[in-house]
Amino acid sequence: MTIPTTASGNRGLQLEQNLIFEQDTPGMTAVDLPAAPKVSERLGEMKNSKPIGLPGLSEPEVVRHYTRLSQKNYSIDSGFYPLGSCTMKHNPRLNEKMARLPGFADVHPFQPISTVQGALELIDTCASWLKELTGMAAVAMSPAAGAHGELCGLMCIKSAHEANGQGHRKTILVPESAHGTNPATAALCGYAVESIPANAEGRVDVAALKAHLRPEIAAVMITNPNTCGLFERDCIEIAKVVHDAGAYFYMDGANYNAIVGRLRIADLGVDAMHINLHKTFSTPHGGGGPGAGPTVLSDKLAPFAPVPMVVKVGEKFEAEEHAGHGAAKQSYGRMKGYHGQFGVFVRAVSYMMAMGGDGLKQASGDAVLNANYLLARLSEEMTPAFEGPCMHEAVFDDRFLKGTNITTLDIAKALIDEGVHPPTMYFPLVVHGALLMEPTETESKATLDQFIASMLHLARKAKSGTAEAEFKNAPMLSPRRRLDETKAARKPILRWTPGAGDAAKQAAE
Ligand SMILES: *Cc1c(COP(=O)(O)O)cnc(C)c1O
């Protein structure tokens, strides 16, 4: 099959779109402004010597430009989005509506406390749910995302060690299968990082962990469920040996959506864990939109939590703004302006209240069921990286492609032609040629079946030995074909310069 080229470069009703600066018709505007009144020159030497370079377009041209761009944006609202490690689930629109209520959307952090009692109560309600669900003593609400929550947890751990005369503990243990933010956070916090290998099952090797424990170890950071989509079964034992060695147990809770309502984190012996509200409790986060990473803390770490803190005094809410006072006597200080991502808290509370405890429990069960359905059905043609059932995400390696010369990347590109956003690929790093899929609880069986049909079709085609050229050329039906991703990452062109587009076109011809 060859794809026809067109005179316009358009593909059917998928239209080519230049940068808005390249559509410039000098002097064109979308509005008629009255002529400026004559005023005497007041800018002196500050006067502009040349035009400022804004493009001239008519209103319909501007509308079409941005509408077309918006149509090029594949999103969770246009189709299945099985990225693993990110939890791209549908977020009920009701929660968006709640976050936009003027009483929530229009409050300002500088308002007098007496006028924002409802907002503080909402933060307190969100905190109560998180403490109830995890069984933990306290929660710091201000961290702005998962990685920021990790930083919060480690700052509490560092403060606790210093307060206990253990400031010499300068190393953090992180398993190989950890999310990249874990070692990055530890390093940012001034710690040395030591890696713990995974066992053949894809879980933390407890014997290796024990062998690394010694008086310099400040904490162990473990993602659970881990990035291989597996539950770390040995957490209770890990917590015990870590505590016996005088260190703290940090759990990365970004994958909390697989266990919420089914397991009290406190019962595992965890000292600190961040929760990605934007992954588990309904906030759209594709494209790097705001998240929130509240960090639950054990009673040992609670005194060191960051300010500001919401505190209830009688019937009123107060905000403890300064470390060294009252409830914040031992606080390590402030890590962010104001109280955190308030709009995300509104969505989370709306979601939690609408779902109820039983609904949250069902959501985590359905997330695990959906992932296991993919794992079981796709195992027909593909090779699961680990034995046994998974949690909320299924991971395959590239053994099923052995001898074909077709790679994980080729499969991902061919999926684009099938109308599916590719799953996470080549992560986790411990799995060769990994494809990591997280269907989430919100996808129907019909959607999953459609994805499975495409995936199985591609796997069979790859193994047939007759379609190598087709795979290497994929995607064939998208507006852009296979891009030089390395060059795009290493030498990104971030600034438009006049004529640059023409030069690139000439070079391509
Ligand atoms: C997403 C994620 C993080 C980081 O969260 P951000 O909100 O993106 O900072 C950390 N750990 C795991 C396992 C994650 O999936």
Image (cartoon, helix red, strand yellow):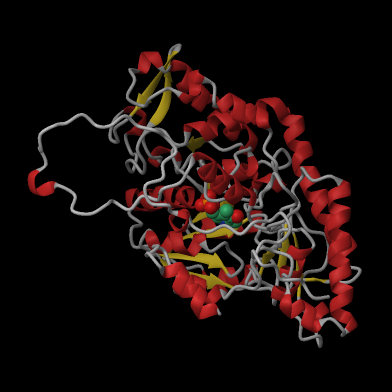
- In the image, residue 4 sits, relative to residue 108, either above or below, namely below
Q: Position of residue 153 (x, y in %)?
A: 46, 49
Rendering quarter of residue 206: bottom right
State which image quarter holds ligand 1. bottom right
Q: Position of residue 101 (x, y in %)?
A: 54, 21
Residue at left offset 59%, top offset 34%: 130
**Residue 23 or residue 181, whichever sits in front:** 23
Tell how many labels. 0
Residue 490 seen in render: no
**Residue 270 or residue 454, whichever sits in front:** 454
Q: Quadrant of the C terminus?
A: bottom right
Rendering quarter of residue 97: top right
- In the image, residue 102 sits, relative to residue 197, either above or below, namely above
Residue 118 seen in render: yes
Residue at left offset 63%, top offset 38%: 281
Q: Farthest residue in the left direction?
A: 44
Q: Quadrant of the N terminus?
A: bottom right
Q: Farthest residue in the bottom direction?
A: 403
